[in-house]
Image (spheres, rainbow, N blue to C red):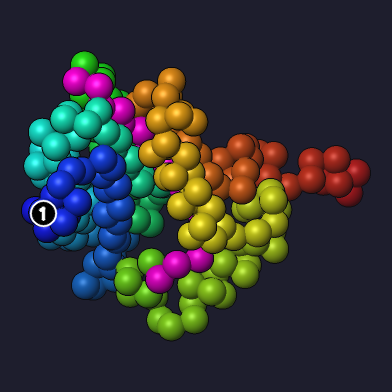
């Protein structure tokens, strides 16, 4: 941040794009995961966001700047038992976004977020997935409309475009404390409606 201020003389936009999830060393999931996994995830996904926001505040207030947080559809309201602590961290981030938005708009700074669904990045490998497994998973869910109704996994540019929109006050000045979901329709699918009900009833 200091180098940015030194080079450009100001800070207009802060994008908090911290996101990490880790496997339990013993392969445990859900509530059985070791609390050290929780600590590590919260350190990266939440503490870093709070710290950077605090450091950036005075610079953003000077120019009436923008903060965009990168959350996840994993925040809910649907359950995410496999990566429980990751989901908790993103739910906390959503509340931070809303609360910080009300706090900082008094100083002219807007805070919003984007909540991606499945996006093809290196996140899977970073989580400890074997090489190629993330792509295999992406291929499966994109071919099942009950997972992604639009039939395609998102690309990084899909999320980047939303961040650019939220960072542009001319285009999004009246949006305060909101999270824009970009998931190809995944969160719109009700569990009981995930399959063709009429086909089931006729069988």
- In the image, is 95 to the left or to the right of 180? left
Please name whichever residue, 107 or 177, is drawn nearer the observer in this view of the structure. Answer: 107
Q: Is residue 195 left or right of residue 23?
A: right
- Up-down relation of residue 179 to residue 35 (above or below): above
Q: Which residue is mark 1?
A: 6
Look at the image and tell me whether residue 79 can be seen: no
How packed mark 1 is, by other alpha carbons closer than 10 Å (few <14, some 14-19, many 20 or more), is few
Q: Is residue 28 above or below residue 76?
A: below
Q: Is residue 50 left or right of residue 45?
A: left
Relative to the observer, which residue lies in front, 191 or 40? 40
Residue 51, position as x, y percentages in the image: 11, 44
Q: Which residues are magenta?
A: 107-122
Judged from the image, the secondary structure of the residue bearing numbered disc 1 is helix
The residue at the point 20 percent across, 43 percent down is 11
Q: Residue at x 61, y 37 (%)?
A: 188
Q: Is residue 111 magenta?
A: yes
Number of marks in picture: 1
Report which quarter residue 22 is drawn in: bottom left
Q: In the current view of this chain or complex, which residue is farthest to the right?
A: 202
């Amino acid at each position: 941040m200091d180098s940015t201020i030194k080079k450009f003389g100001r800070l207009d936009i802060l994008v908090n794009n911290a996101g990490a999830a880790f496997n339990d060393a013993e392969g445990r999931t859900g509530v059985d995961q070791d609390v050290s996994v929780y600590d590590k995830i919260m350190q990266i996904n939440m503490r870093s966001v709070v710290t950077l926001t605090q450091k950036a505040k005075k610079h953003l207030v000077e120019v009436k700047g923008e903060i965009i947080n990168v959350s996840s559809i994993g925040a809910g309201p649907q359950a995410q038992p496999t990566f429980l602590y990751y989901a908790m961290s993103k739910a906390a981030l959503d509340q931070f976004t809303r609360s910080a938005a009300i706090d900082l708009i008094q100083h002219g700074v807007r805070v919003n977020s984007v909540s991606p669904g499945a996006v093809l990045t290196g996140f899977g490998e970073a989580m400890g997935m074997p090489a190629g497994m993330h792509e295999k998973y992406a291929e499966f869910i994109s071919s099942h409309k009950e997972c992604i109704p639009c039939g395609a996994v998102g690309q990084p540019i899909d999320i980047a475009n939303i961040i650019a929109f939220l960072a542009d006050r001319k285009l999004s000045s009246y949006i305060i404390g909101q999270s824009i979901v970009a998931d190809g329709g995944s969160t719109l699918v009700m569990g009981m409606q995930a399959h063709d009900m009429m086909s089931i009833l006729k069988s």
